Image (cartoon, rainbow, N blue to C red):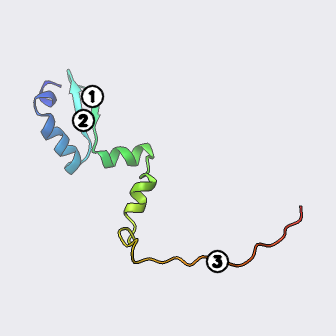
């Protein structure tokens, strides 16, 4: 634990590059440092709708896109 505290930035970088980093106290595993990506995979967290939309290949093309509106009449539905 003392070593992990003294080298926290290195432990975090290793978690990102090499995977989960085990932290022990008196020889007993007490914690694991994970990268954000690994944590999100394990916790089932998904990207937000905003992140999803920004990752779209159409993001940033708002001025170039045109959507035509369907002007057909509505239909009667009986219940």
Q: Which mark is residue 77?
A: none
Q: In which quarter of the image is residue 55?
A: bottom left
Q: How far apart are marks 1 and 2 (CA)?
A: 7 Å
Q: Which mark is residue 70?
A: 3
Which tag, 1 or 3, sits closer to the chain's start? 1
Which tag, 2 or 3, sits closer to the chain's start? 2
In the visual, does 35 lie left or right of 69? left
Q: Dot 1: what SS? A: strand
Name the residue located 40 percent from the left edge and 45 percent from the top edge.
42
Please rate how many residues cluster around mark 1, counting C-alpha atoms within 10 Å: few if below 14, some from 14 to 19, many from 20.
few
Q: Where 13 falls versus 53 (above or below)? A: above
Please rate how many residues cluster around mark 2, counting C-alpha atoms within 10 Å: few if below 14, some from 14 to 19, many from 20.
some
Name the residue located 56 percent from the left edge and 78 percent from the top edge.
68
- Residue 37 position, x and y percent, is 32, 49
- Residue 7 position, x and y percent, is 11, 33
In the visual, does 37 lie left or right of 70? left
Q: Name the residue under label 2.
A: 22
The mark closer to the camera, 1 or 3, is 3
Name the residue located 22 percent from the left edge and 27 percent from the top edge.
24
Q: Quadrant of residue 34?
A: top left
Q: Where 21 falls versus 74 (above or below)? A: above
Q: How far apart are marks 2 and 3 (CA)?
A: 58 Å
Q: Mark 1 points at which residue?
A: 29
In the visual, does 22 lie left or right of 60? left
Asked if disc 1 and disc 3 are in contact, CB closer than 8 Å, the reply is no
Asked if disc 1 and disc 2 are in contact, CB closer than 8 Å, the reply is yes
């Amino acid at each position: 634990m003392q070593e992990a505290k003294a080298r926290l930035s290195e432990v975090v970088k290793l978690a990102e590059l090499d995977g989960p980093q085990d932290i022990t106290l008196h020889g007993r595993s007490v914690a694991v440092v994970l990268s954000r990506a690994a944590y999100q995979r394990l916790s089932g967290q998904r990207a937000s709708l905003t992140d999803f939309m920004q990752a779209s290949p159409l993001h940033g093309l708002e001025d170039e896109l045109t959507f035509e509106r369907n002007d057909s009449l509505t239909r009667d539905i009986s219940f």
